[in-house]
Structure formats: C-alpha cells, structure tokens
Amino acid sequence: MRLPTFLIIGVQKAGTTSIYEYLRQHPQVYMSPVKETNFLEKDWSKIPPNPRKKKKIDTFEKYCQLFQNVTDEIAIGEASPNYLFHYQSSAELIQHYLPQAKMIAILRNPSERAHSDYLMHIREGINEGISLAEQIKLRANSSFTIRKGFYYTPIKHYYETFGREKIKVYLYEDLCNNPVALMQDMYQFIGVDDNFCPDTAKKYQVAQVPKVKLVNTILRKQNLPRTIVASVLRYLLPLTLRQSIRSRLIKLNSTNKTQAPLSPEDRQQLVALYREDILQLQDLIHRDLSSWLS
C-alpha cells in the first residue's frame, strides 16, 4: 500500500482548495479523493468512535483506503489545512505514519484570513451572533478564527521537527499574482514534471456572504420550516433533485464578499494583534511581510 509522499498542512482560507484541484490536474500526482481527511490531526485511537460519523477518517485502515487506487503516480498527497493549527499532535503523527513526507504550507495575511474565515462561518450559519470585533476582543483565548492566524510557532515547530528542506512555505499573494509559477514550483518540490501547466482560471471556495441571513439560516441549518418542507418534498422529488434545488437557492441568496468588507477598525485591531507574530515569521521564512502590517 502506497501512502502520501507530501501533505498540504495549512492554512485554512488561503487557497488550499484551489491548490488541491490544481495538483489533481497533474498526471503524475494522486490526491486523496477526500480533501481534509484530518486523520493526522489527532490520535483517533484515544477517542471513542462516533457511530453517526461513519465516513470520518478515524482509523489508519480508512486512511490507507483513500490511496488504494494509486497506480503509477509519482507523488501522492492529501490536503488538511488544520495540520498547521494542530501542529503539535499533527507533527508527531506525521513523524509516526509518514516520516518521509514533504510538507507544504500556504500562508495568508492573518487579518485577511480571519475576515475570510469569519465570512465563511456566516455563510455556514456558524457563530452567527458573534461579530468579528467581538472575536478580536476574545483574542487568542477562545476564538479559532483568530487563533489560526498565528503562524510563527507552528512553522517553527515543523522546521525543528522535520528540517527546513522538507517544508515549503508559500504566500497566498503568490498564488493570486502568478498561480502557474507557484504550482510549477510546487510540482518541482514534490518531484513531478514541473513543465506541466495547470488550468488555474477557476478559483475554488471563493468567499461569499448571504444576502438575507434568515433565508441562509433556513436553508443551511436544521429548523422547523426546513424540516416541514423537506418532509413534503421527500415524497415528490428524488434526493439529488432536492439537493440541487437547495444549492441553487443558496447560490441565489449569496453575493460576493466585497459586499462585506473588513472594516478599518477591525483591520487595525487585527494588525496590532498579529504584529509581533508577523515580525517573527518573516525572519523565520525569509520573506518580506511588511504588507501584512499596513
């Protein structure tokens, strides 16, 4: 059984879904059919199995099954952006299961990342009553949205655990400015033909926000109106058609994230919060991150 030779370890809301899709285009690359397996996030053997989540990749056997269709591909990978956030447990498990694997991290301006994460939670109907300003006040104590923007310690830990030569750090700006060049550099890093030119025209998981929050909540979360409508349509329409209709309604109720920009006040507070971490990070990865401080 062949297992991953490389991992996308982070970070969320930094283009990892697009990169996952661009990697899949390469004929010499096999990507796990499940994005964000999260298997190497924690030691699942110490956690009681949840019978309601049978699809969860919570055993090594299930993890191996994701790669059973590998044929003659040179590089095998998976993308679980939370591996950077859960750096201590993930690094230990990677060392145990995949000691030879290379790792890739894509980092985004943490203030922009936090805002994008916040908008995603609004879209998914999560923490609807907690504003970004309130989460900033919580600082790094409890808000995952804020905590995931501190990159210095996790990257430093991976460097110290595996060595710099096995870790490749890219910036989200590089992906936006020249996605083909970034992907070809990544192809070279994982050991496949770097002359391959991926189609990077499509961007995946582009942040959107609901036009009407109440409609979004009804469509996305379990509630009485949705349960009643679903119970009626169950006898009239097949499941695939019901899902298609729901997806179309969600899309009609969505608009571009530019309609919900990061406020100057929130940006100023986020920059102040992340400043020291950014200064340490730029020295660690040898990249100028001064634009993140403006």
Image (cartoon, helix red, strand yellow):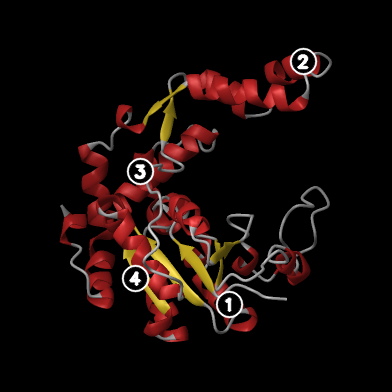
Q: Nearer the viewer, mark 2 or mark 3?
A: 2
Amino acid residing under circle 3? His
Q: Nearer the viewer, mark 3 or mark 1?
A: 1
Q: Position of residue 155 (x, y in %)?
A: 39, 73
Q: Nearer the viewer, residue 290 or 191?
A: 191
Dot 1 or dot 2: first in sequence order is 1
| SS at badge 2 | helix
| SS at badge 1 | helix
Q: Which residue is mark 4?
A: 152
Quadrant for residue 236, please give it.
top right
Label 4 neighbourhood size at 10 Å, few (<14), some (14-19), many (20+)?
some
- The residue located at (73%, 14%) in the rendering is 229
Q: Which residue is mark 2?
A: 233
- Is residue 150 something that shows in the picture? no
Q: Which residue is mark 1?
A: 94
Q: Position of residue 52 (x, y in %)?
A: 80, 47
Amino acid residing under circle 1? Ile
Dot 4 or dot 3: first in sequence order is 3
Mark on residue 115? 3
Whether tag 4 and tag 3 are in contact, CB under 8 A, the answer is no
Q: Position of residue 10 (x, y in %)?
A: 45, 62
Marks 4 and 3, how far apart in space?
Answer: 19 Å
Marks 1 and 2, how far apart in space?
Answer: 46 Å
Q: Position of residue 34 (x, y in %)?
A: 63, 55
